[in-house]
Amino acid sequence: MANDRARGFRRNLTNYGDRDFALYLRRSFARSMGYSLEMLERPIIGIAESGSGFNNCHRTIPELVEAVKRGVLAAGGLPLEFPTISLGEIFLSPTSLMFRNLMSMDVEEMVRAQPMDAVVLIGGCDKTVPAQLMGAISANLPAIQLVTGPMLAMPYRGERLGACTDCRRFWARYRAGGVDEAGINEIEGNLATTAGTCAVMGTASTMACIAEALGMALPDSAAIPAVHADRLRMAEASGKRAAAMAQAGSPRPSEIVTPESVENALRVLLAIGGSTNAIIHLVALAGRRGLQLPLRLFDEISGRVPVLANIRPSGEFLMEDFYYAGGLRALLAEIPDCLHLESLTVNGRTLGENMQGARVSNPKVIRPREQALAATGGTAILYGSLAPDGAVIKTSAADPRLLRHTGPAIVFRDYRDMEARIQQEDLAVDEHSVLVLQNAGPLGGPGMPEWGMLPIPQKLLKQGVRDMVRISDARMSGTSYGCCVLHVAPESFVGGPLALVRSGDAIDLDVPARRLTLKVGEEELARRRAAWRRPPPKYQRGFGALFQDNISQANEGCDLRFLEGTAPTPEPEIH
């Protein structure tokens, strides 16, 4: 039997030069694990699990694996779990984005190499879900995403704390002298008290919503709290559905991830006021299918999609409230005219069919369109002399008065320079200044660390300043907020215009006009450009060297170029 049509343990046989011997040997060793002959004839559903002692978001993965197994067994499949790289956002240096592509390679190669007919991907933490989806798209085996889910809020002195937006809010208060040492220690112990991903619409929850909107996760799966029994029931349902997909051989990611479904995911990103990190991930996901997703499309769509999810950091509620208000299906039901309803999803039904019966149960959390949190999407794409290939700003999380602003630059050449100088009392900075951080992009960081929410100088915090314009080629956490211009491309490390900015230069930010302008004459810029020298490489070996030799820029998805789709003829752009 041809290998691509084989099922179960007959699939992807190890090469010994004798196929019958390879199957005989494989079955022999499989039987050593106690499987009966009947079980060995079943289709195999792989369970890619990314648990780790360094990943707090994934603490519930062992019980999710068991629940997936129940579903697989009930549907006549054989579940076999296998480990992959785990990306714990808080525990990785220099940044988890640098290892997203490595994890995607791990997922792709293990799905492709091992004998399985379908796979359930279990993860949650920020870069884990995009890594798993990227690997699944490249492997193109029937796959279903199961996220770990958000943590619950913690009541604290009349408030409900949600990591990690509130951790940043209280840290700013602490730096300004509004919270003492004992207070910040108490808050530290109350910010994250259950298993799960951040309780706000950070990158983890954003990517969970995108996975569902894209069609790669079951309906209603995005927002279930990690510790809710419904999360285990969703895991069981995912295993059951994966077994059915294994039997049918479809749908595959290539059938689900289409120009239309990617556009659905983009519209959902805007409607939920989601993380700016998701823009990079969506571009990379589309790239794995050979689809071009230009940044200009984000901005074109943004003008037609309202922000309806009243969730921190753009709003006031938390992810558990979003779930109880009806979750993503309820939000989708508010914007059906913005969606391609015929898009196929992982359960074999269309997005429109999945939306039937959905309703909002709390309009304070999921706003009706006539009471939208913002009339247009919460993210804008900027172009101009400072960002020829684009930059990103999360308008829904910025002080509106700063969206049109001109001020003098205060330039930090890298993170260490910023760390050394930003709190100095003699730093010539005021509330009108524009903080600029260089060499924090894909190569300069490396890996685009989440440095984009540059700290407001303490002397300004004491004056009551809580937001100011900040510009960098870095990212910022989806839980962050403020008037932060991010992902400036090309990055300064490769000689983009950001590398040429000097302290005192006037920078003009005009978000309504979508412009980011460095107000310096061409002759002076030419002199600076001639004097600029590219910094030396940061790595000489290992994945770091592979990364720096192959990474694309932020507007291209920060993927390794050799992992991008390689269709024989160019695929059409998404329109």
Image (cartoon, rainbow, N blue to C red):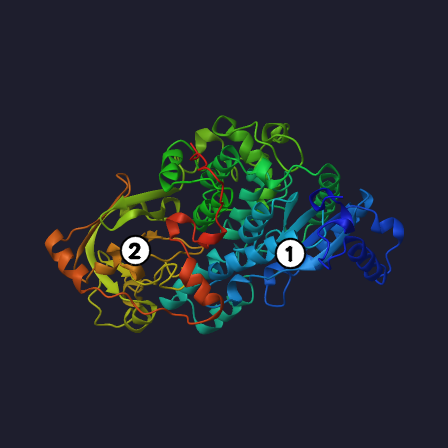
> Which label was assigned to residue 261?
none
Q: Is residue 34 left or right of residue 222?
A: right
Which residue is painted at 14% across and 53% down in the image? Answer: 520
Camera sees residue 137: yes
Mark 1: which secondary structure?
helix
Per the image, the residue denoted by label 2 is 471
Residue at image position (42%, 55%) is: 480
Q: Earlier in the sequence, mark 2 or mark 1?
A: 1
The image quarter containing residue 198 is: bottom right
Q: Position of residue 66 (x, y in %)?
A: 76, 54
Q: Nearer the viewer, mark 2 or mark 1?
A: 1
Residue highlighted by disc 1: 110
Kind of residue sitting beneath label 2:
Ile
In which quadrant of the rendered view does residue 240 lie?
top right
Q: Secondary structure at mark 2?
A: strand
Residue nearest the observer in this picture, 352 or 547 = 547
| C-alpha gap between disc 2 and disc 1 | 39 Å
* Residue 478 seen in the figure: no
Q: Are marks 2 and 1 in contact (CB under 8 Å)?
A: no
Please name the amino acid that badge 1 sits on.
Met
Image quarter of the C terminus: top left
User: Picture coordinates of residue 197 (x, y %)?
Assistant: 57, 55
